[in-house]
Image (cartoon, rainbow, N blue to C red):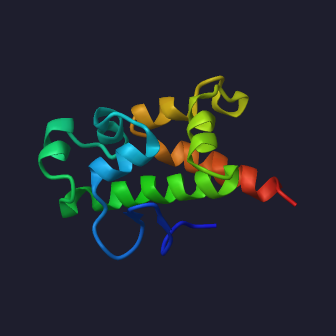
Amino acid sequence: MSAVGLQFGSLKLAGDPINAMDLAGKMGLPLDTLSRAVRAESTDLAANPRLNQWQPGLRAVANLWGDLTAMFGGEENARLFMKRKRPELMDQTPLHYLEQGEPEVVQNLVHAMREMLP
């Protein structure tokens, strides 16, 4: 289930530009971690959190976050998932891949997990 068109608290995931500060707050991440996930300099992202240049990456991470909160029943469980090592990720945490600028690795895992659900 994609998060496009849904709203989690004050974070809109469709229509308006996504604010990087809001997304980082919802995910419980430092802005620096989110900046690496969207391949931006943290100072640039902090100065211009809604800049069009960052929107594709922010939307991808916001959609991932929406998928995780839907799959795990809320933000706290999604945060726990992001911090736990996964054998499918070579015993790394999903958060590790965000920090490496590879949110698509986590999205692929979530997609595979969703496919296995009845």
In the picture, the quarter occupied by the N terminus is bottom right
Q: Quadrant of the C terminus?
A: bottom right
**Front position in the image: 37 or 74:** 74
Residue 37 pos. (x, y %): 37, 41
Q: Quadrant of residue 39?
A: top left
Q: Is residue 108 left or right of residue 53?
A: right
Tell me the residue at 68%/52% (across/down).
73
Q: Position of residue 115 (x, y in %)?
A: 77, 58
- Count how many numbered circles sit on residues in the image: 0
Furthest residue to the front?
9
Where residue 54 sits in the image (x, y, percent)?
A: 25, 56
Residue 92's spot in the image, x, y percent? 59, 25
Relative horizontal placement of residue 48, taking residue 76 as reference (left or right): left
Q: Is residue 25 left or right of residue 43?
A: right
| 48 relative position to 74: left or right | left
Residue at the (14%, 52%) spot, across then down: 48
Please report the residue visible at 11 percent of the width from the left and 46 percent of the height from the top. Answer: 47
Residue lying at 31% horizontally and 62% vertically, measured from the top left:
18
Q: Quadrant of residue 33?
A: top left
Q: Looking at this view, is 24 or 116 the one in front? A: 24
* 58 in relation to 82, above or below: below
